[in-house]
Image: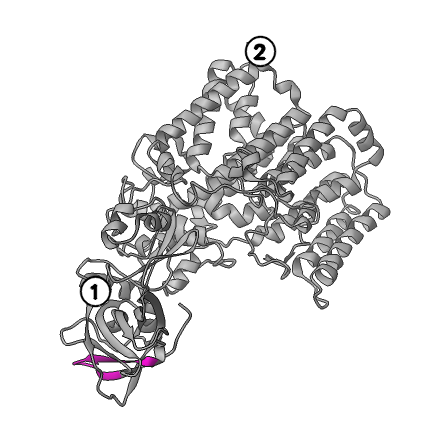
């Protein structure tokens, strides 16, 4: 009844049937084989090599490619949290970190609870070693992405090989690759609820499949911008090109099944969703429309016009991830190589379909380009215009893929010349005119025409094996793989989960052992990487706010400021600061003194001839008329933590007097690594002073003299090497 009268024949399972499927679906079988080999080798696309570099762990980076520091969502958050989940035996809470935070995040982590039934990419964590399980996680998601979108494009009218090529081009597109290593679940599982809906199986099997696929998608990663963008794109594509699959008799129960899957996801997230909805970030974040650079839209058709390699042109103050769009040469190839008369006839026969597709695309582009207030666009205001590049890319690529499947392709000298000429023109327009750069042959701009030339030249030797469409699709897919497809490295998972020594981890571990709280505290950003290695550190990334923890640390902080500062997803960075400070919406610097090892401070500093150590941080905050809160930070030559060690300081009597002074020790792995001496595991310091001045002016750092005192190392004067606070 839910198939609009169509009854599907039930296939007869058996060896012959499986062999027939293998022959007809050999591309998907090949993809499965590649994914299996990838998992067996224990590889991942993780950029965790940036973490091992920050932690000074030798020979722990990728075996191919380059770990990219810009992917901090990966190396500083997602990958360390997989380490944390494994270290806590897939339990519900991190029992190692100072925060004892719950291990429930908007992205799925392996666990030992009922939700694991809806995390198929993580099942391997229950049966194999963590390194291979982590590799299987990425291999499964890669296969799910390519197979899912290939099947989806087939449902839109594309042939098997053509659909597989388009799915591969999509997988290796810029947007997918730059966000893949931390957003793979929300990208890979996106087509599967739609495929379950389109399945011709009986309703009693199809409806549970829709519910299950929806739950897997939402539990895999509950990231509304990508979910809403993909949902909108799929709705427009099928309403335009396959409206016959959307009869009310089928659509209504399908939506009900999807709602059931969403309810399962809500049951999993029932404690997290209300909590995060009330946060300053990301819960209260609503976006206005507009702001997407129009020049980036051209990258949907000419994918290298906005970038120099992976990096954005200097016209835009952004990074390699934010500039990403779902760009490929496929739309341009359709426009140039398709038979134009056949393509025009196809479009004339489908005015409603073309109109619906254009209307959906214009809606998406309006939100990306026009200054629409958030209040005027419910739901869309949850999708920042830059993130809607996922939806616009799916619409553009999907629309041109459908058009390219409907008309024959032609390969003529004129068409080749036009295609290659447009590539050269795009390079000249973007690099010489738009960016106003000196003549430079960008590797990506150069690679694309060469790959196309090679593929089309090969047709001369095998015209039957390489008809025009196949040759051009192979070239376009090769361009995608050899350019943006090289963004992520090949990182062995064994190097992620192995306990490899490094000076930073040794320093942090020894500091934690001597800290009365048992915590490591360092004024350096490591994300969650230190906790991921099993060292309890205040330096962390909190996926959920930990308000009670910080209220104990800062009991006198006004409530409004406290909520704004700590009620958020945030990287926590302890520093010598007077008060907590939101550096950016996901980074909070906190005064380190409530967590750090105490340090004796002595007022008055007799002359010291030798100089060793630095004052590299200074801050003066007005507390009242001629009264100042002063923070000093840096490092000294203290060996270990021992009695008799102290910080001596004094202020120029002509400037004012020190009313109150407190000090604390910090780990400075950077100094210990530079001096190759792990005994300097607590040689950082911070000092919090209350100073009264003779004038209303704030005291400068030059008014202070500081010395370190250590029975084992002697007395040394600290040099001012001030850095911006």
- At 76% from the left and 56% from the top, the residue drawn is 424
Circle nearer the viewer, 2 or 1: 1
Residue holding disc 1: 597
Say what secondary structure mark 1 lies in.
Answer: strand
Pointer 2: residues within 10 angstroms few (<14), some, or many (20+)? few
* Residue 125 x, y percent position in the rendering: 34, 40
Q: Is residue 506 above or below residue 319?
A: below
Q: Is residue 505 visible?
A: yes
Q: Would you name the residue on which mark 2 appears?
A: 7
What is the span of residues highlighted in magenta in the rendered image?
A: 703-716
Residue 193 to residue 126: above or below: above
Residue 31 on image: x %, y %? 55, 39
Q: Secondary structure at mark 2?
A: loop
Whether residue 32 is visible:
no
Q: Nearer the viewer, residue 556 or 545?
A: 556
Q: Please say if the residues under marks 2 and 1 sit with CB atoms less than 8 Å apart.
A: no
């Amino acid at each position: 009844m839910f198939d609009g009268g169509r009854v599907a024949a039930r296939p007869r399972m058996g060896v012959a049937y499986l062999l027939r499927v293998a022959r007809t679906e050999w591309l998907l079988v090949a993809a499965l084989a590649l994914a299996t080999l990838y998992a067996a080798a224990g590889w991942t696309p993780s950029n965790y090599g940036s973490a091992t570099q920050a932690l000074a762990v030798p020979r722990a980076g990728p075996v191919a490619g380059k770990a990219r520091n810009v992917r901090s969502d990966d190396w500083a958050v997602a990958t360390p949290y997989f380490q944390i989940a494994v270290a806590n035996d897939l339990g519900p809470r991190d029992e190692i970190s100072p925060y004892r935070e719950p291990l429930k995040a908007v992205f799925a982590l392996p666990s030992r609870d009922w939700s694991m039934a809806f995390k198929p990419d993580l099942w391997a964590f229950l049966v194999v070693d963590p390194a291979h399980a982590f590799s299987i996680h990425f291999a499964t998601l890669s296969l799910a992405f390519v197979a899912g979108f290939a099947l989806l494009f087939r449902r839109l009218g594309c042939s098997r090989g053509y659909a597989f090529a388009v799915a591969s081009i999509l997988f290796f597109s810029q947007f997918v690759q730059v966000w893949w290593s931390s957003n793979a679940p929300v990208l890979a599982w996106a087509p599967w609820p739609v495929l379950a809906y389109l399945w011709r199986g009986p309703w009693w099997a199809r409806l549970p499949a829709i519910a299950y696929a929806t739950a897997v998608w939402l539990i895999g990663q509950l990231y509304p911008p990508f979910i809403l963008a993909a949902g909108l794109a799929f709705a427009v594509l099928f309403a335009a090109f396959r409206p016959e699959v959307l009869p009310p008799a089928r659509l209504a129960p399908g939506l009900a099944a999807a709602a059931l899957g969403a309810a399962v996801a809500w049951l999993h997230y029932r404690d997290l969703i209300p909590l995060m909805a009330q946060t300053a970030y990301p819960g209260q974040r609503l976006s206005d429309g507009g702001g997407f650079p129009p020049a980036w839209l051209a990258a949907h058709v000419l994918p290298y016009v906005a970038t120099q390699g992976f990096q954005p042109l200097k016209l835009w103050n952004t990074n390699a991830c934010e500039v990403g769009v779902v760009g490929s040469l496929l739309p341009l190839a359709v426009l140039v190589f398709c038979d134009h008369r056949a393509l025009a006839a196809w479009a004339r026969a489908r005015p409603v379909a073309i109109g619906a597709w254009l209307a959906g695309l214009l809606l998406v582009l309006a939100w990306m380009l026009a200054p629409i207030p958030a209040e005027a666009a419910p739901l869309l205001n949850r999708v920042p215009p830059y993130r809607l590049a996922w939806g616009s890319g799916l619409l553009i690529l999907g629309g041109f893929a459908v058009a390219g499947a409907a008309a024959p392709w032609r390969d003529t000298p004129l068409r080749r010349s036009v295609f290659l000429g447009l590539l050269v023109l795009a390079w000249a327009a973007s690099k010489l005119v738009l960016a106003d750069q000196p003549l430079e042959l960008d590797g990506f701009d150069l690679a694309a025409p060469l790959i196309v030339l090679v593929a089309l030249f090969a047709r001369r030797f095998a015209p039957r094996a390489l008809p025009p469409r196949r040759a051009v699709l192979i070239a376009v897919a090769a361009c995608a793989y050899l350019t943006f497809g090289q963004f992520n490295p090949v990182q062995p998972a064994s190097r992620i989960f192995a306990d490899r020594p490094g000076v930073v981890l040794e320093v942090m571990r020894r500091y934690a052992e001597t800290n009365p709280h048992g915590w490591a505290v360092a004024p350096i950003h490591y994300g969650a990487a230190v906790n991921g290695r099993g060292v309890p550190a205040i330096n962390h990334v909190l996926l959920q706010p930990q308000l009670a923890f910080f209220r104990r640390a800062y009991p006198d902080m006004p409530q409004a400021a406290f909520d704004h500062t700590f009620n958020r997803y945030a990287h926590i960075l302890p520093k010598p600061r007077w008060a907590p400070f939101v550096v950016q919406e996901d980074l909070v610097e906190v005064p380190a003194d409530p967590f750090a090892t105490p340090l004796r401070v002595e007022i008055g500093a007799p002359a010291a001839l030798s100089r060793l150590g630095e004052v590299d941080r200074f801050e003066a905050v007005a507390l009242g008329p001629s009264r100042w809160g002063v923070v000093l930070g840096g490092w000294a030559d203290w060996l270990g933590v021992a009695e008799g060690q102290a910080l001596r300081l004094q202020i120029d009597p002509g400037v004012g007097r020190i009313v109150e002074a407190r000090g604390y020790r910090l780990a400075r792995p950077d100094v210990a690594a530079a001096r190759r001496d792990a005994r300097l595991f607590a040689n950082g310091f911070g000092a919090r002073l209350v100073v009264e001045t003779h004038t209303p002016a704030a005291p400068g750092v030059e008014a202070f003299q500081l010395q370190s005192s250590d029975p084992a190392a002697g007395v040394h004067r600290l040099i001012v090497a001030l850095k911006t606070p």
